[in-house]
Amino acid sequence: MAPTDLSTLQLPRACRDALAQQRSERVNGHTITIATDWWNNEIAAAHLPGAPVTGPDVTQLSRGDLFTDAANLDAGSEEELLRFLWRVLAWGSGMKLRLNRQRIRTVADNPSSALAALRQALQAGREGPARAYEALRPGGRNALAYLGPAFSTKVLYFAGSGALDHPCVILDSQVAATLRNTCKWGSLGEDGWPTSTYVRYCTLLDRWAHEESRQLGRRIGIDEIERWLFRP
């Protein structure tokens, strides 16, 4: 299939309507129920730092919580870096825990390699989508086993601490389904996206964000559009 000409794609009206709402509510306040006890127990069982992911009575995480984590993150600290990873994975998984034990085991099997990849990704994530994506998906493979595009792009996204000019954004199956079915990106595919596709995706959302910023008279972050694509 020939690549879709993204310059012809227009932002759906329903997304434009959603952008009239406050960013703080739609993005920062996007909250997911997490399996707190499961994460704390599994991390402890693997003898890894970074737990607890939350206090025992906290069962939810928001994007705003993870923005705060990233803003205060000391990437030189093994404990802080892994706690950030666990919390991103917990938020991204919600109550669906498939493959998370394998992700934890991947880190436990070679913590120095996992930490090096994460540090590189956090730095690259602030510079541009191509280098960032390659940091966790070098040559189309996972730098950390079981950490594919859906979760690696969450790590890259949250590395930006919620900054409006952060160049990386989440691309997962739900976002992709809306792009294909509603926005008519017919050549996108369902998963396993190469770096070039991720860059095209971020560029498309950046164009839409700039267009809507002019219309609304305020700066629109690309994640405000991703938030709608995730659950239109």
Image (cartoon, rainbow, N blue to C red):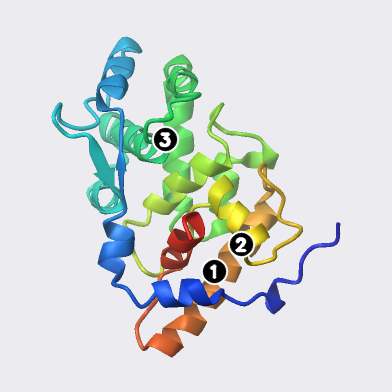
Residue 229 in view: yes
Residue 211: where, in percent of width, then height? 51, 83
Type of amino acid under label 2: Tyr
Q: CA distance from mark 2 to mark 3?
A: 22 Å
Q: Is residue 163 above or below residue 42?
A: below
Residue 33: where, in percent of width, then height? 29, 38
Closer-to-camera residue (208/81): 208
Residue annotated with mark 2: 201
Tell me the tag on residue 74. Answer: none
Q: CA distance from mark 1 to mark 2?
A: 6 Å
At label 3, counting other C-alpha atoms closer than 10 Å, the crowd grade (few under 14, some 14-19, many 20 or more) is some
Select label 1 or label 3 by which is in front. 3
Select label 2 or label 3 by which is in front. 3
Tell me the tag on residue 93. Answer: 3
Mark earlier in primary sequence (2, 3): 3
Residue 12: where, in percent of width, then height? 56, 74
Tell me the tag on residue 205. Answer: 1
At label 1, counting other C-alpha atoms closer than 10 Å, the crowd grade (few under 14, some 14-19, many 20 or more) is many
Type of amino acid under label 3: Ser
Q: Is residue 202 above or below residue 104?
A: below
The residue tagged with tag 3: helix, strand or loop? helix
Q: Residue at 67%, 42% (x, y): give it.
A: 192
Type of amino acid under label 1: Leu
Mark earlier in primary sequence (1, 3): 3
Q: Residue at 49%, 40% (x, y): give it.
A: 151
Taking the image as shown, residue 166 lies to the left or right of residue 205, namely left
Q: Is residue 38 above or below residue 183?
A: above
Residue 48 in view: no
Taking the image as shown, residue 131 lies to the left or right of residue 47, namely right
Q: Are marks 1 and 2 in contact (CB under 8 Å)?
A: yes
Q: CA distance from mark 1 to mark 3?
A: 24 Å
